[in-house]
Image (spheres, helix red, strand yellow):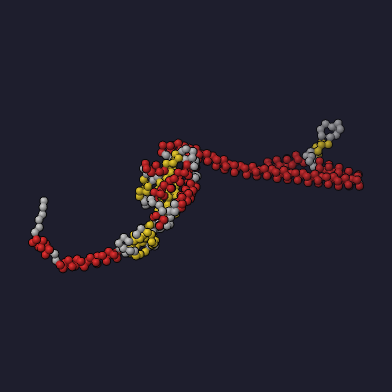
Amino acid sequence: MAYSFDKDSLENVTLRVNPEKLKRLLLWIPVLLLVALVLSSFYTVQPEGKVVVKRFGKVVSIREPGLHFKFPFLIDRIYFVPTERVLKEEFGFRTQKAGQRTQYVRNRVHEDESLMLTGDLNVINVEWVVQYRIKDPNKFLHQVRNQRASIRDVSEAVMRRIVGNRLGSDVLTVGRVEIAALARSEMQEILDSYDMGVHIATIQLQDVTPPDSVKPAFNKVNESRQEKERLINEAEKRRNQEVPKAQGEAQQIIAEAQGYAAERINLAKGEASRFKAIQTEYSQAPDVTRQRLYIETMDKVLSQVHKVYVVEEGGIMPIPLLNLNEDAAGSIEKARSQ
């Protein structure tokens, strides 16, 4: 299809353009350019981060939060970096909905991240969270190409190495805090060698469990281990009760023996001193001393005698004398009957 224009038709088209409108349009173009210039020359940095300013691809400044000026028309380009925000990477799960009741999602890809082989050739499922902050926005943007993927790769490599050097029971029970601290230290050392400008705040082991296929066996092992700990604690309790009791009884017996020994020694010393005193008196007055000893002995012996019988030679019945015990017993019985 061909079109043909004659001279008259072209003149008619030219005459339809209003010169006044064209002039007004030309006057608005500088105004629009000026507005675009002003709008592209100012920018605001949010309080949660800093801005890296590049001029023709070269970093010229790092701006703090607030209102700032830059060269317009793509001469200066700005890149916002959230340096005041705590960022996190999740392994083995993903947070689907945060709030009072946080919801998590787990799938096959997440399980591939968390399944690890321990030092005793057991497979366990380790879920953890890495929290970090950007301390140098310039290094964070330019030292490593893919920052997030690098952090995830380093964290996964460090965690697999640490878990692989430990027993499965240690990872599942008492070693979680130590593993998290060691992983944070090694991960920070590797990222510092990259000069990445990132500070690792914390590494938390969220959930450490055996795979679903072997959970029943692990549960039985844990129950047996808990039963063992319970029996050990009960034995320690009994030991703490019985040992001090036995030690106290032993100390009591020793003290009684020492007291008895001191008593016998003192008694023997007293008897020896008394015998020496009597011997001295006897050597000075034998008759008087002999008589006194006889009287003292008879007094000691007769004081323990309840009945005294005087038997006459050829007599049939002994004559009771000093029958005081029977009189006393009869008096008591008589008093009770009354």
Residue 251 place in picture, x, y as percent: 68, 44
Residue at the outermost front position = 7
Residue 210 place in picture, x, y as percent: 44, 40
Q: Is residue 101 visible?
A: no
Q: Quadrant of residue 50?
A: bottom left
Q: Residue at x 83, y 42 (%)?
A: 297
Viewer-proximal residue among 79 and 228? 79
Q: Is residue 262 visible?
A: yes
Q: Residue at x 37, y 41 (%)?
A: 108
Which part of the image, by quadrant, shows the C terminus?
Answer: top right
Q: Residue at x 14, y 66 (%)?
A: 18
Q: Residue at x 42, y 57 (%)?
A: 136
Residue 177 place in picture, x, y as percent: 48, 48
For residue 310, above or below residue 134 = above
For residue 18, above or below residue 110 = below
Disc tally is 0
Residue 302 place in picture, x, y as percent: 81, 41
Viewer-proximal residue among 12 and 256? 12
